[in-house]
Each structure stands twice: as structure tokens, then as C-alpha cells.
């Protein structure tokens, strides 16, 4: 994603994108291959779970779809948990599959734990926002809220952390998937623009929160080490 011309033989853009330091004579270590494997396994497992759930839903006459977010109802609160793993048919799920795989994998490349924390923030912000603002009598389902959240997270996290590799990756993602952001506006009937909007907002929140250490370090806000007097 990033070029190494003029930066010497030790430059490894993959290490920068993953938030790891680059040292003299650095070479791609075993941990990076393991990180790729864990990230790939995690996102493939998640998308596979979505297909299993949709398959069961088809057998169960799509009864699971009723477990989505029902705005401003007590029963609909549980949909905050379940909505992103439910879809209104195979077409709905398949339309989300490629961006889920690509964006989810890129999010997890910064570290699986960090990626899961970002996803949890997006999941919660998208769900609560949709529950508060969605149309009365509607039910909101689908993983597109995660797609929009991962998209904005990838775009903004590098700017918050001032990480060159992540900024460049964010620009590439913006070029490839930025047109999706029009989906945060009210438009097509049957599309949860609220889920898109608050998913995108959740991605920004996650980018800000998870770049806290980098921002504090940049400002020199580390807590000084205590030295006992002699």
C-alpha cells in the first residue's frame, strides 16, 4: 500500500500499518505472519457465522428477522445486540459480504484485540443511535452498520494517531469505498440510513478513543516516572 523508495532497506510499510516500530535492519518477523493469519481467520469466521445464521433463518421462515432493532421500544433494545448478525435474505447478506471481508480484515490487521474493541464501539454506537432515531414501527437489521463503522475507522484513525502508514491506508480505503458514505443520508425505502449514519459515527468515535495513547504520547502527556529521593 505504501512505497519504500528512498527510505532505506529497513523500511517495511506493513509494520507501520500494523502500528509496530521499524528498527534498523528490520525484517518481517513471525508475529506479522501470525497476525495476518489471526485477522483472516477472525473475519472469515465472523462472515461464516453470518451465513450460518441466515441459513437457519431461511429454514425458520425468517423469524429471526423480527429480533432486530425496534426504535424506542423496550423489546427492541435487544436488537442492539442482534441486528448486525441478521439479514433480510441472501441478497442482503451477499451485498455486505465483500466489504465486510475487506474492511474487517484491514481493521483487524492493527491487532485483533484492538480491532475487536473498535468493532464493539461501532456496534454499540450504531445500535443505540438507531434505536433512538429510527422510524416508529420499523425493524433494523444488517451488518452494514459495521461496514460503515469500519470504513470511517480506517479513514480517520491514522489522522488521530498521526501514523503515516495508517493515513495512507485510510486514503486508499477512502478512494475505493468512500462512495458508500452517501448511504448515511435518507434515501431509498427499506434501507436503514440511521444504521449507516451511526455506524459511521461509531467508527470515528472508535478511531478517537483507540488512538488515545498515541495522542497523549505526541503531546508529551506521559505520567513521569517517580524517582524516590536519596
Image (cartoon, grey):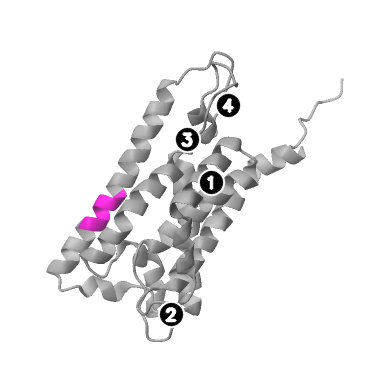
Residue 71 numbered tag? 2
- Depth check, mark 2 against mark 1: the one in front is 1
Residue 1 is covered by the magenta coloring: no
Query: Residue 209 location in percent, x, y?
Result: 60, 51
- Give the side of residue 100 with respect to residue 88, left or right: right
Q: How far apart are the alpha carbons under marks 1 and 4?
A: 21 Å
Task: Assign the C terminus to one quadrant of the image.
Answer: top right
Please give the range of residues in magenta: 46-51
Q: Earlier in the sequence, mark 4 or mark 2?
A: 4
Residue 21 numbered tag? 4
Query: Residue 78 location in percent, x, y?
Result: 38, 71
- Depth check, mark 2 against mark 3: the one in front is 3
Q: Earlier in the sequence, mark 2 or mark 1?
A: 2
Residue 221 visible in image: no
Q: How far apart are the alpha carbons under marks 1 and 3?
A: 10 Å
- Give the side of residue 218 with respect to residue 81, left or right: right
Query: Residue 110 location in percent, x, y?
Result: 48, 39
Q: Which residue is mark 1?
A: 171
Residue 47 is covered by the magenta coloring: yes
Q: Earlier in the sequence, mark 1 or mark 3?
A: 3
SS at mark 2 in the image: loop
Q: Which residue is mark 3?
A: 1
Q: Quadrant of residue 188?
A: bottom left
Q: Are marks 2 and 1 in contact (CB under 8 Å)?
A: no
Q: In the image, what residue occupies the spot 51% across and 48% down?
A: 154
Q: Are marks 1 and 4 in contact (CB under 8 Å)?
A: no
Within 10 angstroms of label 2, few (less than 14), some, or many (20 or more) residues? many
In-front residue for pair 153/86: 153
Amino acid at each position: 500500500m505504501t512505497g519504500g523508495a528512498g527510505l532505506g532497506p529497513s523500511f517495511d510499510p506493513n509494520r507501520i500499518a500494523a502500528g509496530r516500530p521499524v528498527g534498523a535492519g528490520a525484517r518481517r518477523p513471525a508475529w506479522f505472519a501470525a497476525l495476518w493469519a489471526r485477522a483472516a481467520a477472525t473475519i472469515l469466521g465472523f462472515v461464516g457465522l453470518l451465513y450460518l445464521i441466515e441459513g437457519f433463518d431461511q429454514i425458520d421462515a425468517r423469524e429471526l428477522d423480527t429480533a432486530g432493532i425496534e426504535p424506542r421500544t423496550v423489546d427492541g433494545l435487544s436488537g442492539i445486540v442482534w441486528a448486525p448478525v441478521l439479514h433480510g435474505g441472501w441478497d442482503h447478506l451477499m451485498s455486505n459480504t465483500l466489504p465486510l471481508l475487506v474492511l474487517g480484515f484491514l481493521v483487524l490487521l492493527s491487532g485483533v484485540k484492538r480491532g475487536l474493541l473498535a468493532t464493539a464501539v461501532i456496534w454499540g454506537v450504531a445500535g443505540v443511535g438507531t434505536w433512538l432515531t429510527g422510524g416508529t414501527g420499523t425493524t433494523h437489521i444488517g451488518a452494514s452498520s459495521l461496514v460503515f463503522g469500519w470504513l470511517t475507522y480506517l479513514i480517520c484513525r491514522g489522522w488521530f494517531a498521526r501514523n503515516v502508514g495508517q493515513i495512507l491506508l485510510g486514503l486508499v480505503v477512502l478512494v475505493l469505498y468512500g462512495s458508500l458514505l452517501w448511504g448515511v443520508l435518507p434515501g431509498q425505502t427499506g434501507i436503514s440510513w440511521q444504521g449507516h449514519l451511526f455506524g459511521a459515527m461509531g467508527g470515528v468515535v472508535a478511531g478517537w478513543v483507540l488512538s488515545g495513547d498515541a495522542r497523549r504520547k505526541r503531546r508529551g502527556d506521559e505520567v513521569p516516572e517517580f524517582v524516590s529521593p536519596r
